[in-house]
Image (cartoon, helix red, strand yellow):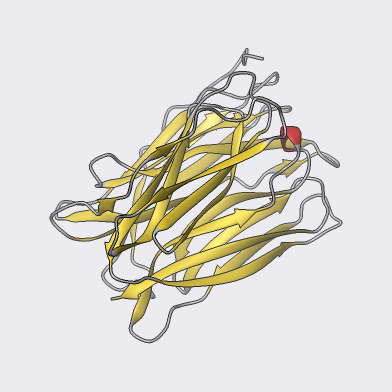
C-alpha cells in the first residue's frame, strides 16, 4: 500500500563533533534528521549524511533512531525503519536513510554517525554484492556477503535498499567478510539490496557481547556494550545481529542503535511484542 496523507519534515541541519575516549585518533561527526508520520503506511525515505572534515576519511559509521512507542502487544505507534547505513561513495562520510511506519502519526528522529581518521585516500572497499531481490513473501529473510581482498580484513560494513518495508536484522563482519540479513516486513515489490565491506590491511580483532531485551513489558529496551579491545588496540567499527522479526514487525527484537561510544561499541534493541529477545553486538579493533 502506498502511503497517503503524509507529512515529511525537512532534514535537520545539525552537525556535532565528539571524540570518544576509547577511540584514539578518531573524530565523530553526526547529522540528524526527522520525518513525520502517516496514518496509513510508511513515509517516503529520508536521508542524513554525516561528512568528515577536510583531511580525514570515514573508517566506519552507524545510526540511532527514536525509541519506538508501543501500543499494546505488537502495535508500534512510532517506528523508524533504517533502509541504509553505508559509507558515502567517496569514503568521506556516512549515509543513513529510512522511513517511519504507522499506525499512529508521530515524528521520528534519526542520526547518522561518521567515524573519521586522518588519511588522504578513502578506505578500501570490498566487492559489492547485490542480491536479485528481497524475498517476495512477507516474513521471509535472506542474506548476502561482501568480501575484502586477500591480505585485508573487514573493519566495518554497510547496507542499502530502496524498499521502505525491509528491515536489516543483521550487519556484521568476520575475517574478510561482511554479511547482512534482510527481512520483508510488508514489501509488495521486489527491490534489490546492497552490502559493502570496508577493508584494512592486516588482522582485525573481533569482540562480541550478547544482549537480552527484557520482557514481559511491552516497552522493554536493552543497550549492549562491547567493551574496549586488548592493550594498544581500539575499536574502529561495529555491527549487530538479531533474530529476524515476524511479518510486519509484530514480533522479535529490532535494533534502533549501532554506534561507537566512550567505552566501546553499543547496540540498542527493543522487543516489539514485549517478550524476552536476544541479539548480539560486535566491535572490530586494530592498533591505534
Q: Is residue 271 left or right of residue 208?
A: right
User: Residue at the location (51% across, 34% down)?
Assistant: 98
Is residue 29 something one can see in this rendering? no
- Judging depth in this view, the residue of 131 and 280 nearest the camera is 131
Looking at the picture, does residue 40 appear above or below residue 83? above
- View extreme (bottom): residue: 231
At 86% from the left and 56% from the top, the residue drawn is: 216
Percent of width and height locating residue 280: 62, 62
- Give x and y (percent) for residue 146: 41, 47
Q: Residue furthest front?
A: 150
Instruction: Locate the C terminus and report the quarter of the image it occupies.
Output: bottom left
Q: Does residue 278 appear in the picture of this structure?
A: yes
Residue 118 drawn at (x, y percent) = 18, 62
Eyeballing the image, is 239 above or below 77?
below
Q: Nearer the viewer, residue 67 or 259?
A: 259
Q: Answer left or right for 34 relative to 52.
A: right
Horizontal side of residue 151 vs 277, given as left or right: left
Tell me the residue at 62%/12% (across/down): 4
Q: Total number of numbered labels? A: 0
Q: Is 40 drawn above or below residue 170 in the view shown?
A: above
Q: Residue at x 64, y 47 (%)?
A: 67
Residue 38, located in which quarter of the rendered image?
A: top right
Q: Quadrant of the N terminus?
A: top right
Q: Position of residue 232 (x, y in %)?
A: 33, 84
Q: In this image, 105 relative to 217: left or right?
A: left
Q: Nearer the viewer, residue 105 or 240?
A: 240
Amino acid at each position: 500500500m502506498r502511503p497517503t496523507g503524509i507529512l515529511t519534515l525537512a532534514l535537520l541541519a545539525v552537525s556535532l563533533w565528539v571524540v570518544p575516549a576509547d577511540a584514539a585518533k578518531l573524530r565523530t561527526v553526526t547529522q540528524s534528521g526527522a520525518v513525520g508520520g502517516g496514518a496509513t503506511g510508511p513515509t517516503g525515505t529520508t536521508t542524513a549524511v554525516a561528512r568528515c572534515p577536510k583531511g580525514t576519511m570515514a573508517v566506519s559509521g552507524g545510526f540511532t533512531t527514536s525509541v519506538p512507542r508501543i501500543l499494546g502487544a505488537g502495535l508500534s505507534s512510532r517506528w523508524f525503519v533504517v533502509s541504509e547505513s553505508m559509507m558515502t561513495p567517496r569514503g568521506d562520510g556516512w549515509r543513513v536513510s529510512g522511513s517511519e511506519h504507522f499506525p499512529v502519526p508521530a515524528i521520528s528522529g534519526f542520526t547518522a554517525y561518521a567515524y573519521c581518521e586522518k588519511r588522504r585516500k578513502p578506505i578500501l572497499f570490498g566487492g559489492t554484492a547485490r542480491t536479485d531481490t528481497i524475498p517476495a513473501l512477507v516474513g521471509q529473510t535472506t542474506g548476502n556477503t561482501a568480501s575484502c581482498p586477500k591480505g585485508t580484513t573487514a573493519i566495518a560494513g554497510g547496507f542499502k535498499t530502496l524498499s521502505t518495508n525491509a528491515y536489516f536484522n543483521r550487519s556484521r563482519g568476520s575475517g574478510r567478510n561482511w554479511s547482512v540479513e534482510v527481512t520483508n516486513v510488508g514489501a509488495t515489490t521486489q527491490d534489490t539490496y546492497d552490502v559493502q565491506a570496508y577493508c584494512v590491511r592486516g588482522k582485525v580483532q573481533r569482540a562480541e557481547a550478547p544482549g537480552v531485551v527484557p520482557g514481559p513489558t511491552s516497552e522493554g529496551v536493552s543497550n549492549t556494550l562491547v567493551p574496549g579491545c586488548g592493550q594498544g588496540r581500539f575499536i574502529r567499527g561495529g555491527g549487530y545481529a538479531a533474530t529476524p522479526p515476524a511479518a510486519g514487525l509484530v514480533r522479535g527484537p529490532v535494533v534502533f542503535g549501532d554506534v561507537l561510544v566512550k567505552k566501546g561499541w553499543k547496540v540498542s534493541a527493543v522487543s516489539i511484542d514485549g517478550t524476552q529477545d536476544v541479539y548480539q553486538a560486535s566491535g572490530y579493533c586494530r592498533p591505534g
